[in-house]
Amino acid sequence: MNESLSESDEETRICPHCGSKLAYGVSFCPSCGKQIAGDVHSAGAVKRPLSLTIIAAIWFFIGVIYILNSISVLTAATVWTYLTFALGVLSGGTAFGLWTGKRWSYNCAFIAAVLYIILGTLSVTSSSQTFHVSFNFLPLLWAVVVFYYVRKPDAKKYLGVQ
């Protein structure tokens, strides 16, 4: 897939009434004569898939929870506290990238999912109470969901990866 659209593709619009191509900035369709409102879509625009919208929203929420959790136990800071904070920041950044369709978020999603698997597995096998506050078996399930939905063709197209 071509990563950048040519200028002519960016300026091509589609009439919502008859489907004809329109020049950028026109107020009336030259084919059907109807007025063009703000609902004219770019010919090359790809709509964000619902699955990515949900994943981004949940991931943002998880990131906030992890950051707040790590801040709340900062007085008894351990390696896991810092890992929780870092994973919270990574989750929030990945959520932003997925929401806005940034290409880098595809790789960040996989990196974060792998970290969720590793830390989730460690938390299930660990006896540390501090560790269990931050991680449990849910990150394992979350990582599987992310792996499945981010690899779908509509998500890859939205993120600009092939």
Image (cartoon, helix red, strand yellow):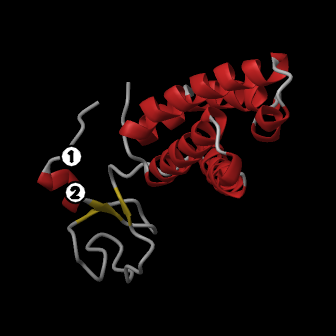
User: In this view of the protein, which residue sits in the foreground, 59 or 145?
Assistant: 59
* In-image side of 13 versus 69 (left or right): left
Q: Position of residue 86 (x, y in %)?
A: 53, 42
**Residue drawn 65% across the image and 25% down it:** 148
Q: Which mark is residue 10?
A: 2
CA separation in Å, label 2 and label 1: 6 Å
Marks 2 and 1 close (CB-CB < 8 Å): yes
The answer to which of marks 2 and 1 sits earlier in the sequence is: 1
Q: Residue furthest front?
A: 75
Q: Nearer the viewer, residue 150 or 84?
A: 84
Can you say whether 44 is above or below 147 in the image? below
Residue denoted by label 1: 5
* Residue at (58, 41) in percent of width and height: 82
In the depicted structure, whether residue 56 falls above or below residue 107: below
Residue shown at 49% from the left, 51% from the top: 47
Instruction: Characterize the local packing of mark 2: few (<14), some (14-19) or many (20 or more) Cα atoms within 10 angstroms.
Output: some
Identify the residue at the far left of this view: 7
Q: Residue at x 63, y 41 (%)?
A: 84
Which quadrant is home to the N terminus?
A: top left
Query: In this image, 17 relative to 124: left or right?
Result: left
Q: Is 115 located above or below residue 44 in the figure?
A: above
- SS of the residue under disc 1: loop
